[in-house]
């Protein structure tokens, strides 16, 4: 399906853009800033993966339970929805406290998902049938 190709492009672009930006920032501002950017990009990638899995699960459940009087959502789906924010918060805290990685660099790294989405969108505009 067409949207799956776009999702796959976003999935590989997120860590690639994060790594590239991390190297550039590490050279300019130091390795901790570069590491923070890359860690943030990896967290953004993981966030996208878990959100994708949870939404795919909800889609399957909605079609399987169509017409049911009280549809049920498994606990694992809720854990993936909420757990991704907990994981991001814990990872940022641990990297800040233990490795002294600046919080701002990790927060900027989280923006790699947005940059990857923008890049994938521009690619789709320029190559609509690829």
Image (cartoon, grey):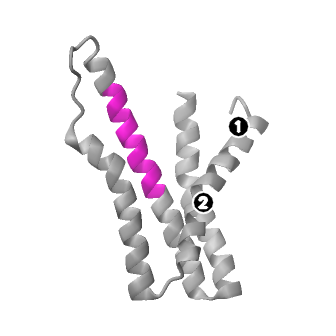
In the image, is residue 42 above or below residue 61?
A: below
Magenta stretch secondary structure, dominant = helix
In the rendered structure, does residue 31 fall within the stretch colored magenta? no
In the rendered structure, does residue 47 fall within the stretch colored magenta? yes
Residue sticking out furthest to the right: 126
Q: Please give the name of the residue rendered at 55% of the width and 32% of the height, measured from the top-left corner.
A: 3
Q: What element carries label 1?
A: helix
Q: Please give the name of the residue rendered at 69% of the width and 41% of the height, measured from the top-left corner.
A: 121
Image quadrant in which the C terminus is located: top right
Q: Please give the name of the residue rendered at 39% of the width and 71% of the height, measured from the top-left corner.
A: 91
The spot of residue 15 in percent (x, y) is 54, 62
Query: Is 84 situated left or right of 44 in this image?
Result: left
Query: Residue 112, labelled with which disc?
Result: 2
**Residue carrying label 1:** 124
Q: Which of marks 2 and 1 is nearer the N terminus?
A: 2
- Count neighbours of disc 1 (C-alpha within 10 A) and say few if under 14, some if 14 to 19, many if 20 or more: few
- Count neighbours of disc 2 (C-alpha within 10 A) and say few if under 14, some if 14 to 19, many if 20 or more: many
Query: Residue 76, labelled with which disc?
Result: none
The spot of residue 104 in percent (x, y) is 58, 75
Question: What's the magenta region?
Answer: 45-60
In the image, is residue 28 above or below residue 37?
A: below
């Amino acid at each position: 399906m067409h949207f799956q190709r776009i999702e796959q492009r976003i999935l590989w672009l997120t860590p690639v853009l994060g790594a590239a930006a991390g190297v550039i920032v590490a050279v300019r501002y130091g390795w901790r800033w570069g590491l923070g950017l890359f860690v943030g990009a990896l967290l953004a990638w993981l966030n996208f993966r878990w959100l994708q899995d949870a939404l795919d699960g909800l889609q399957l459940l909605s079609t399987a339970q169509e017409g049911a009087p009280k549809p049920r959502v498994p606990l694992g789906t809720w854990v993936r929805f909420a757990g991704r924010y907990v994981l991001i918060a814990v990872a940022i805290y641990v990297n800040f406290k233990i490795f002294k990685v600046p919080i701002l660099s990790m927060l900027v790294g989280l923006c790699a998902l947005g940059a990857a989405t923008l890049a994938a969108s521009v690619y789709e505009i320029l190559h609509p049938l690829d």
